[in-house]
Image (cartoon, helix red, strand yellow):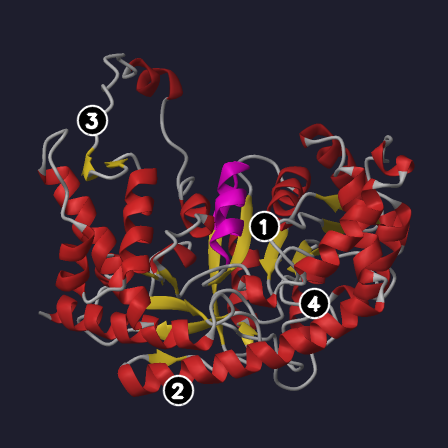
Amino acid sequence: MNEDNAAVRVIEDLRAAAHAGRAGDRMPSVRELMARHRASPATVQQAIQRVAAEGLVEVRPGRGSFVARRQATSEQDLSWQAVALGEGRPGEDLVANLVAVPKPEAIPLSSGYLDPDLQPTEALGAALSRAARRPASWGRVPVEGKEELRAWFAKEAGGELRAGDMTVCAGAQEALATVFRGLADRGDAVLVESPTYLGAIAAARDAGLKVVPVPADQDGVRPDLLRAAFERTGAKLFYCQPLHANPHGAVLSEERRPEVAQIVRGAGAFLVEDDWARGFTVDGTAPPTLASQDVDGHVVHVRSLTKVAAPGLRVAVIGARGPAGIRLKNTRSKQDLYVAGPLQEAAIDFVTSPVWRRHLRTLQQSLRARRDFLVRAVREHLPEFDIAPSSGGLHLWARLPDGVDDLELTAAAAARDVVVFPGRPWFAAEPPGSFLRLTYGGAPEHVLAEGVRRLADAVAAVRG
């Protein structure tokens, strides 16, 4: 880890020298950088190569490194586009920021995807290779997806859902966009838990819907406030993450589940169940899906394989019965005809093989260890952070101490190459305080430890 820190210091030093100098100026020598940062020759050489790849430094073999010539800036005037594009869409940059790939030297304390060490990439590669060799994989695919894959998702969801009720999508974000566009009209209200997944907020707003927050606690959405929200807005959609809600980790309690179902049924509405964390339960046993207990077709089930496997496995499903299922299949076909056949074949191969269950068992053990480690690290270095209980998922939800602003802290952490995500965007209205989402699934324990130490430095800097 010390060598990693040295590499970061050397890179920052080289960048600063390149920006301060003129084209052709000599950069500090390898020997000078080694002495200045107590770094090994290999570390310094790698840092020089990194900055050279950024176009800031030119390496001349046998002579050293020099400030590279700046590329001429374009003189084109693109300001007309601001007029043509008109008003921006609220929150359109949030999802892009959330899934942005961090710099190699940055420590990811907020990531929506598994650490590469936890991804079953070898098994996925083998499954995709087998799928690619089957000529039928490259043919046309039904709009709703391959039947074997839809049948697997339906069995996993339980209840009355069948293969014919499922529509395969290219990831959960596309599935949510399809649901919001297909089941509501522009200007309609959609109820969401507060806080909730900011990708859902963005997708709903992009569909022209009015997002109405309903407060949640550690037992999930509050039924009394949900009933009041339906009565006030006349909404016909309620977006819910009943299992390890992102970002705050709540599980909809056994006591509240029937009451929530009754409220939705009484409103003649749909409950959009985002089952994103199925497979991520690390304490106890995960409750069944809400779809499995739905008898009248009020639950629209969404599940993805991307989070629990790897970012490149962009395969998800929407499950809905009756006219709603037909509407969603038709809406999906207008956005994109179908998910690529080889990817669907690889997904079928993967989830129906023994490696799938082995992956889940190993993953849950690793996530439990990392969650416990991050909790201990935060309590040691950031004891004023109030961490919400979490029995699974990928994240910890931390309320910040008084006087610490989440946006300021995020910026201060970024200056120390630590990526955290502020709490504010996860609320559809004014947040009740300052929060951070901290992820334990995106990095190994020694990286999490260093990230928390740097985050503590950032807190001290914000407080002045």
- Label 2 residue SS: helix
Which residue is located at x 55 percent, y 68 percent? 245
| Mark in the foreground, 3 or 1 | 3
Q: Nearer the viewer, residue 224 or 400?
A: 400
Q: Position of residue 213 (x, y in %)?
A: 46, 58
Q: Report if the CB atoms under discs 4 and 1 are less than 8 Å apart.
A: no
Which residue is located at x 65 percent, y 69 percent? 260
| Mark in the foreground, 4 or 3 | 3
In the picture of the structure, the residue carrying the numbered disc 3 is 69
Using a 10 Å C-alpha cutoff, classify the residue at mark 4 as few (fewer than 14 neighbours), some (14 to 19) or many (20 or more). Answer: many
Q: Which mark is residue 376?
A: 2
- Label 1 residue SS: loop
| Mark in the foreground, 3 or 2 | 3
State the CA–CA distance, disc 4 to disc 1: 15 Å
Placement of the N terminus among the 4 image quadrants = bottom left
State the CA–CA distance, disc 4 to disc 2: 37 Å
In the picture of the structure, the residue carrying the numbered disc 4 is 261
What is the span of residues highlighted in magenta in the rendered image?
Answer: 197-211
| Mark in the foreground, 4 or 2 | 2
State the CA–CA distance, disc 3 to disc 1: 58 Å
Question: In the shown orientation, is residue 389 left or right of residue 123?
Answer: left
Q: Which mark is residue 235?
A: 1
Q: Amino acid at mark 1?
A: Ala
Which residue is located at x 52 percent, y 41 percent? 209
Q: Nearer the viewer, residue 187 or 5?
A: 5
